[in-house]
Image (cartoon, rainbow, N blue to C red):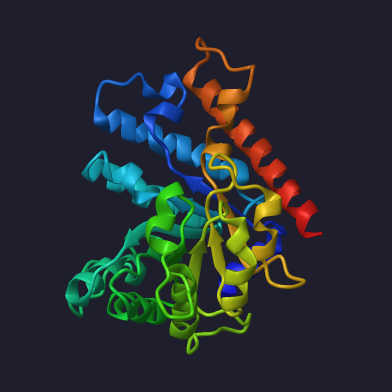
Amino acid sequence: MDRLITVLKKVGNPSVVGLDPKSQILPQQLTQVESVQQLAQSYLDFNRSIIDAVTGLVAVVKPQIAMYEAMGPVGLEVYCKTTAYASSKGLYVLGDVKRGDIGTTAAAYASHLAGSPAVGDLETEDLWHEDAITVNPFLGYDGIRPFLQAAEKADKDIFVLCSTSNPSSSQLQALPCGPDGMTVSQHLAELIELWGQDSRGGCGFSRIGAVVGATHPDQASDLRARLPHTFLLVPGYGAQGGTAADVAALFTDNSSYGASISSSRGIIAAWQKDPSYRPDMSRTQALDLVAKAARKAARQMRDDLTAVLN
């Protein structure tokens, strides 16, 4: 996590911008198209506008790959062009792919980190341009090891789902899993801390991070205590209901760099609340408005988080 800490300190902002485009949150100037290829180009133009707007204000972007896979091969091409563009701007790119499997299948999925497809010993260029990805731990350490090995080889990171922000997460994650009443999320937190103990960097955090949602503030202090050397990715801020006060306990003591707080719709769809938007705007004008609104929303999120942390 050393590079992540470095870029966060550079901007002084723990925010993450989720790049999750879909037709419902793009201006109509970008969605009035005649083919999936044209829609894909609109997604890319939209993403580049957001990236340009927040570069220098935030350090991390998190594209959700499902939004791109929904368009098929052309969508995956946009995903890779988006991550490459973000990387060229010096941003830390966290691919939200939530992969989880074992053996050779997991190793193939882990090519996201290695930068190449599963092609044996052949050397290929970095196709995915990601600094980290999200991973599902349901299969236990057998499902984590291939990703950790790929991360170590490429000097990258993984973020393991621990306590997610969705309402029904408690159906599994809040279940007691031992005689002491420890919940599944608490047990996962201790496993993640254990799995990462041999990969701690100079910053004190391991290359295995944990995903801990902002929508369960009652769990924040407990999970933070179980994850002293684990950097946290915190979804659920903004549109899902999480607030700056809810996430404060997820940061390490006297440090604003133990967690990154993610917001997607709250930033990339901020233009929808701007009264200056007009349906008769040109495509360029609409993209300019998207960028302006995103930067304003990202700045407000930074200020809200900073006020609470200070």
Q: Nearer the viewer, residue 124 or 215?
A: 215
Percent coordinates x, y for residue 76 in the rendering: 29, 48
Image quarter of residue 179: bottom left
Position of the C terminus by quadrant:
bottom right
Residue 106 placement (x, y as % from top left): 24, 71
Image quarter where the N terminus lies is bottom right
Question: Is the residue 161 above or below the residue 23 in the image?
Answer: below
**Can residue 8 be seen by looking at this rendering?**
yes
**Front-lying residue, 68 or 119:** 68
Q: Residue at x 58, y 32 (%)?
A: 270
Which quadrant holds residue 161?
Answer: bottom left
Q: Is residue 221 left or right of residue 80?
A: right
Q: Nearer the viewer, residue 202 or 38?
A: 202
Residue in view at x 55 percent, y 75 percent: 230
Q: Position of residue 16 (x, y in %)?
A: 57, 53
Q: Judge whether 150 appears above or below 37 on screen.
A: below
Q: Residue at x 56, y 66 (%)?
A: 232
The structure residue drawn at horizontal position 68% and vertical position 36%, both measured from the top left corner, is 296
Viewer-proximal residue, 175 or 103?
175
Count of numbered circles on the image? 0
Do we see residue 59 in this rendering?
no
Image-based side of 248 in relation to 207, left or right = right
User: Where in the figure is residue 288, as x and y percent of width and height?
Assistant: 58, 28
Q: Residue furthest bottom?
A: 198
> Is 26 above or below relative to 184?
above
The residue lying furthest to the front in this view is 179
Left or right of 102 in this view: 275: right
